Image (spheres, rainbow, N blue to C red):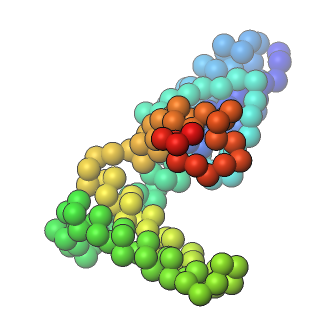
């Protein structure tokens, strides 16, 4: 019997030590344990292995947990009624200005705790807007990066901050 390290992947990864006669048998063992919910992902499970099982419909990521926490916070206070797309967009802009205020009088001196607070507010409202519009933040960011890769080819944009239309 051989020993395999089997990786279960979505946004987080989990490595399991499995004894099996083949890679396929190792995969089947992990799938069975996973389907019985005997294995749970944790935030520090971020490594690579020989075998990878990908099932985006089963795993929950730290981002998913955070979105649920934000949703619960708002529902508990009955604040969803105020979270229209336009109100959330305004809030993103306001909080982004407060983030910029952390750097108002200096390029290199700032209070890290203040930056963290304001950055958290910006991201919180961004995630809420994604929720209201039923958008997956991972998907929309990946799609935007894909577009930017085409607009900013490495050979023309490396080391320069020129807008894509002027490259």
Compared with 30, 162 (above or below) is: below
Q: Quadrant of residue 104?
A: bottom right
Residue displayed at 76% across by 24% down: 50
Viewer-proximal residue among 4 and 93: 93
Residue displayed at 23% across by 59% down: 85
Compared with 59, 119 (above or below) is: below
Q: Where is residue 51 in the image (x, y as percent from the top left)?
A: 70, 23
Q: Position of residue 155 (x, y in %)?
A: 68, 33
Residue extending farthest to the left is 81
- Position of 47 with respect to 153 (left or right) is right
Residue displayed at 75% across by 30% down: 49
- Position of 155 with respect to 140 (left or right) is right
Compared with 114, 134 (above or below) is: above
Q: Position of residue 120 (x, y in %)?
A: 49, 70
Residue extending farthest to the front is 166
Which quadrant, please, contains the C terminus?
Answer: top right
Q: Position of residue 71 (x, y in %)?
A: 33, 62
Viewer-proximal residue among 71 and 126: 126
Query: Can I make out residue 142 in this image?
Result: no
Residue extending farthest to the right is 2
Residue displayed at 82% across by 23% down: 3
């Amino acid at each position: 019997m051989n020993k395999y390290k089997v990786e279960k992947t979505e946004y987080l990864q989990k490595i399991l030590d499995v004894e099996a006669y083949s890679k396929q048998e190792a995969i089947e063992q992990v799938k069975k344990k996973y389907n019985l919910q005997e294995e749970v992902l944790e935030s520090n499970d971020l490594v690579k292995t020989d075998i990878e099982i990908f099932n985006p419909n089963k795993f929950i990521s730290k981002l998913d947990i955070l979105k649920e926490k934000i949703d619960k916070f708002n529902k508990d206070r009955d604040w969803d009624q105020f979270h229209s797309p336009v109100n959330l967009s305004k809030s993103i802009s306001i909080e982004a200005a407060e983030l910029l205020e952390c750097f108002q009088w200096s390029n290199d001196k700032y209070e890290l705790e203040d930056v963290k607070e304001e950055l958290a507010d910006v991201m919180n409202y961004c995630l809420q807007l994604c929720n209201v519009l039923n958008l997956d933040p991972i998907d929309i960011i990946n799609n935007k990066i894909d577009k930017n890769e085409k607009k900013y080819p490495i050979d023309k944009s490396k080391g320069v901050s020129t807008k894509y239309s002027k490259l």
